[in-house]
Amino acid sequence: MPAMTMTKIPILDLSTEIDTLWAPITEAVQRVLRSGQFILGPEVKAFEDEAADYLGAKHAVGCNSGTDALVIALRALGVSPGDEVITTSFSFIASAEGISMVGATPVLVDIEPQTFNLDPAAIEAKITPRTKAIIPVHLFGQAADMDAITDIAARHELKILEDTAQAFGGTFNGKKLGTIGDVGAFSFFPTKNLGAYGDGGLIATNDDHVADLARMLRVHGSKKRYHNEIEGYNSRLDALQAAILRVKLPHVDEWNALRRAAADRYDALLAEVPGVVTPHRAPGCPGPPGCEHVFHQYTVRITNGRRDAVAERMSDAGVGTMIYYPVPIHRLPVYQHLVFDDLPFTDQACAEVLSLPMWPQIDEATQRAVTEALTDALR
Ligand SMILES: *Cc1c(COP(=O)(O)O)cnc(C)c1O
């Protein structure tokens, strides 16, 4: 191959965002430095109020990460050792790890191949007398089928914890994701749709009791300092991260709309490319503003066993891609002591998915270069 001057395209580029928000971010950071209050405190309280207001939830409780939000939410829902919790195997490890960290057993089920989200029929088939909760994961920014899941949970008296780490601002039937079930867990990991500049997480709920418990659990199980009532965690949101998130929160709808526009451009650019399946928008959802995909990832399928070769060729061409996820949770070494059903749609997704560069400000020329590299790689 001849040497070319090539501009590398990363999978994610946050530089425009930080340039645009440099002044308010540095102002917010300086305000926190001057305040001398670095953990919880008024900045975190203000962010929690603004996030609750944005989400339309009664309570928002900041914590240290999305993973901690899942653990704390499960504890607050009363999930304990011996219980079973059903979730999808096609997710980040944290969706299942939260369950095992509270001593319960993850029961991993298959996905709907088109949306990559957990299949309601598969949930129903795995319910036992020990089942306590369901964790739908709104993967890549698209809602799981919350009508069907809510119906199953009601009929079997199960709790719903929405793993909304990838879908901040997404909606289903006009409601913000993470506020439809009993509790929602959010992550502010820097790459997420609302990202901090470090770790952070949030628990959202309309249930006063769950919110009270979550507030206690994040500070070692105490309401009053040094009067600990239950065993908890050190999982507090930093004031610096809260101040940064307060600057970013008012932009999140605009950023999500830009992601959708970028997804539409990819759809058009890839419509005629054989061997590429573009993301499917969930059926039965009335569409914006009632049901908005927020495209945390733009994830295609590369069929015919060519995915790994395509990813490698794109990388050689200077285009960053990612495989979310190469190994399903039920095949991870950590869970080999558990017995799982065959999950063929999950296995197939892991073999075929490829996430393309996606961020709110990605422009058409960049996307054209990505799709050209993808088309070349398939030749
Ligand atoms: C990122 C993520 C998490 C964990 O969030 P952290 O803040 O990194 O702990 C959980 N679930 C899903 C689906 C995620 O994508």
Image (spheres, rainbow, N blue to C red):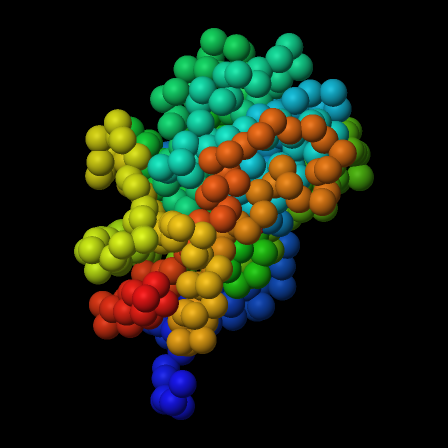
Q: Is residue 23 left or right of residue 225?
A: left
Q: Is residue 28 left or right of residue 258?
A: right
Instruction: Answer above or below: position of 244 versus 67.
Output: below
Query: Residue 237 or 271: which is nearer the viewer?
Result: 271
**Residue 58 x %, y %:** 44, 31
**Residue 81 x %, y %:** 75, 24
Instruction: Answer above or below: position of 134 versus 350.
Output: above
Quadrant of the image occupied by residue 208:
top right
Instruction: Answer above or below: position of 76 versus 249.
Output: above
Q: At x 31% / y 48%, what residue is drawn?
A: 277
The answer to whether residue 174 is visible is no
Query: Residue 170 or 252: which is nearer the viewer?
Result: 170
**Residue 30 x %, y %:** 52, 70
Query: Residue 36 or 9: which is nearer the viewer?
Result: 9
Number of numbered discs present?
0
Quadrant of the image occupied by residue 75:
top right
Q: At x 50% / y 46%, what residue is drawn?
A: 350
Q: Is residue 377 left or right of residue 290?
A: right
Q: At x 58% / y 30%, what residue is drawn?
A: 342
Q: Is residue 366 left or right of residue 184?
A: left
The answer to whether residue 73 is visible is yes
**Residue 311 x %, y %:** 45, 64
Image quadrant holding the N terminus, namely bottom left
Image quadrant holding the C terminus, namely bottom left
Q: At x 56% / y 36%, what residue is drawn?
A: 89
